[in-house]
Amino acid sequence: MQERGRTYPARKSALIRCSACRSVEGRIREKICIDKVQCVQECVKKDTACFKLEKIRVGVMRSSNIKAVIFDMDGVLIDTEKHYNAAWCEAARMAGFDFKREHALMLRSCDAQLAAKMMKDIFGAGFDYFAIREVRRRLVAERLEKYGLEKKPGIDEILAFLHEKCIKAAVATATPIELTLQHLEKIGVRDQFDKIVSAKQVEHGKPAPDVYLYACAQIGEEPADCIAVEDSPNGIRSAYAAGCKPVMVPDLTQPDEELLSLLYAVADTLWDIRRFV
């Protein structure tokens, strides 16, 4: 079976657990969908996105041409997006805006100029994005001081695996480079990467492809030979536009229909990325 340039063995691509196999409580029953056509028809009626997500999770085989894995940082390597989300909401509400979780989710990894325009479009010209961002930065720092900087599960294992397989590892983040280096040093992985770059070092931030193109150039690899690990829509669009193979490790949100069409794969944890390299 061919899909987006990848080949799957017939038997494996047919053995797909679909949403039709789940009980009302969400538990997976012993039944496995062998009849793929019937499985697709049932899932389209019930939950197309769920079927596609399960298919992406089980169907992608290892690719022998992967030369590097490029990681986003916040929400992928460190568990900080929850703090950014809470801090954005608090900072904007302090400024008098009815700012909700879904607004903060829009800002994940987003280029500042684009984010400022989006927020003005939603809340009006009085929304001073950059002033509110300064308050958000202070609030995030306070939260990290209180709760600590947490590593995402599987980070040490996947970096050791990539090193063993002689596959390069890099970071391409929207966070300023100085803070990025501090965070990676604090969790003990800074020296595990061949290159660490920030969107602040290029003309356009995510969802533009600039930072991934820059990261690929810095490690000397073609984008098509690189997996890009992301948790947010802006990051996935950036990686896809650059020509990388986007793999999502969901953090605060699951991929929707649009993102599923851009993804090379979905992994439950960082350690699961080993299945795709």
Image: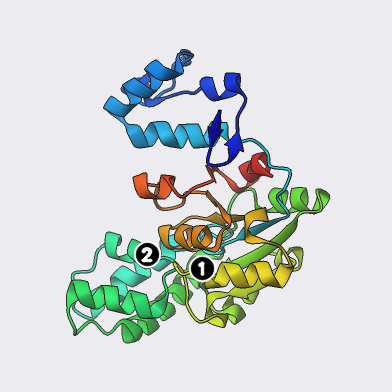
Q: Position of residue 204 (x, y in %)?
A: 47, 77
Q: Secondary structure at mark 2?
A: helix
268 to the left or right of 216: left
What residue appears at the point 34 percent right and 33 percent down from the top-left corner?
A: 48
Q: Position of residue 117 (x, y in %)?
A: 28, 78
At label 1, the amino acid type is Pro
Q: Secondary structure at mark 1?
A: loop
At label 2, the amino acid type is Asn
Position above or below: 96 against 34: below
194 to the left or right of 154: right
Residue marked by disc 1: 209
Position above or below: 107 against 117: above
Binning the other alpha carbons within 10 Å of mark 2 as few (below 14), some (14 to 19) or many (20 upward) gives many
Upstream in sequence: badge 2 or badge 1: 2
Which quadrant holds the C terminus? top right
Label 2 or label 1, whichever lies nearer to me, is: 1
Residue 251 visible in the shown view: yes
Residue marked by disc 2: 85
